[in-house]
Image (cartoon, rainbow, N blue to C red):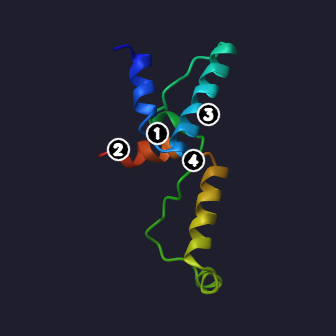
Amino acid sequence: MTTREKLIQEISHVPEELVEELFDFLLFVQTRRQQNKPLTAPKPHALHAGEFSIQQNLDKPLPEEILKELEDISLMQIMDDIGYQAEKNGLTPEILESILANED
């Protein structure tokens, strides 16, 4: 059985949402190839030096004024803001995954 046949067989068993994602990915890959840009694997986090920064004093308690501000904010809002700020500073899901996977 060819890879194409295996793929068609697998697609017939997955939910429509996943088929839509696969289709989007296929279009993305085709576009990249047409632009002659090679697809690259995510870089290990060490190669992302300078693209984002992590605060060094994470063990220190937050200042009182920040804690008072946080009393009126839901945890969901805080987590969303952390995610937004991380992305804004260059922390992608791939970088985060490589950091979390590092066992050093």
x%, y% of residue 5? 41, 19
Residue type marked 2? Asn
Element marked by disc 4: loop
Look at discs 2 and 3 and give the one toward the viewer: 3
Element marked by disc 3: helix
The numbered mark, 2 or 1, whose residue comes first in the sequence reads: 1
Report, in whole angstroms, how far the alpha carbon at label 2 lies from the one at label 4.
15 Å
Quickly name the residue at label 2.
Answer: 102
Residue type marked 1? His
x%, y% of residue 31? 67, 21
Total residue callouts: 4
Report, in whole angstroms, how far the alpha carbon at label 2 lies from the one at label 3.
30 Å
Q: Is residue 21 left or right of residue 103?
A: right
x%, y% of residue 7? 43, 25
Task: Report if the CB atoms under discs 2 and 1 are less than 8 Å apart.
Answer: yes
Residue type marked 4? Leu
x%, y% of residue 102? 34, 44
- Seen from the viewer's position, the closer of residues 13 and 44 is 13
In this view, 35 is above or below 47: above
The numbered mark, 2 or 3, whose residue comes first in the sequence reads: 3
Quickly name the residue at label 3.
Answer: 24
Q: Is residue 43 left or right of residue 36?
A: left
The numbered mark, 3 or 1, whose residue comes first in the sequence reads: 3
Quadrant housing residue 59: bottom left
Quickly name the residue at label 1.
Answer: 45
Q: Judge the density around disc 2: few (<14), some (14-19), many (≥20) Cα neighbours within 10 Å.
A: few
Element marked by disc 1: helix
Quickly name the residue at label 4.
Answer: 91
